[in-house]
Image (cartoon, rainbow, N blue to C red):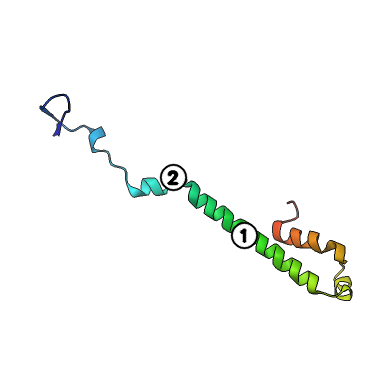
């Protein structure tokens, strides 16, 4: 039984009054902070891969780059393609 605000009389509880929100209802919603954190982590991972590839290729000599079919002007584009994909 639920007391109504308008009067002191009691009325039977309705289904609406007994509805509860559970934590699982909240957790399955889209939380923008969780999505932002995941997006930032993915971006940082790709950027780290780009920087590592750029560093490794820059450390090679011109002869070593020529052996793998590259020249110095291609280092940035190869590192970028490695980290972000060919269509980025």
- Residue beneath disc 1: 44
User: CB under 8 Å between callouts 1 and 2?
Assistant: no
Mark 2: secondary structure: loop
Left or right placement of residue 19 versus residue 77 in this view: left
Between circles 1 and 2, the one closer to the viewer is: 1
Which residue is pictured at 88% across the width and 73% down the height? 62
Mark 1: secondary structure: helix
Quadrant of res 83: bottom right
Q: How far apart are marks 1 and 2 (CA)?
A: 25 Å
- Callout 1 crowding tier (Cα within 10 Å): few <14, some 14–19, many ≥20: few
Quadrant of res 7: top left
Which residue is pictured at 81% across the width and 64% down the height? 75
Above/below status of 74 relative to 35? below
- Residue beneath disc 2: 29
Left or right placement of residue 9 versus residue 38 in this view: left
Which residue is pictured at 42% across the width and 47% down the height? 28
Residue 36 is situated, as x and y percent measured from the top left of the image, at 54, 51
Q: Residue furthest top?
A: 6
Left or right placement of residue 41 versus residue 62 in this view: left
């Amino acid at each position: 039984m639920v007391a109504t605000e308008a009067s002191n009389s009691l009325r039977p509880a309705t289904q609406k009054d007994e509805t509860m929100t559970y934590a699982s209802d909240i957790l399955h919603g889209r939380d923008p902070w969780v999505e932002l954190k995941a997006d930032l982590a993915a971006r940082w991972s790709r950027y780290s891969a780009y920087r590592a590839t750029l560093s490794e290729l820059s450390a090679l000599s011109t002869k070593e780059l020529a052996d793998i079919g590259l020249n110095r002007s291609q280092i940035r584009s190869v590192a970028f393609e490695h980290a972000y994909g060919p269509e980025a």
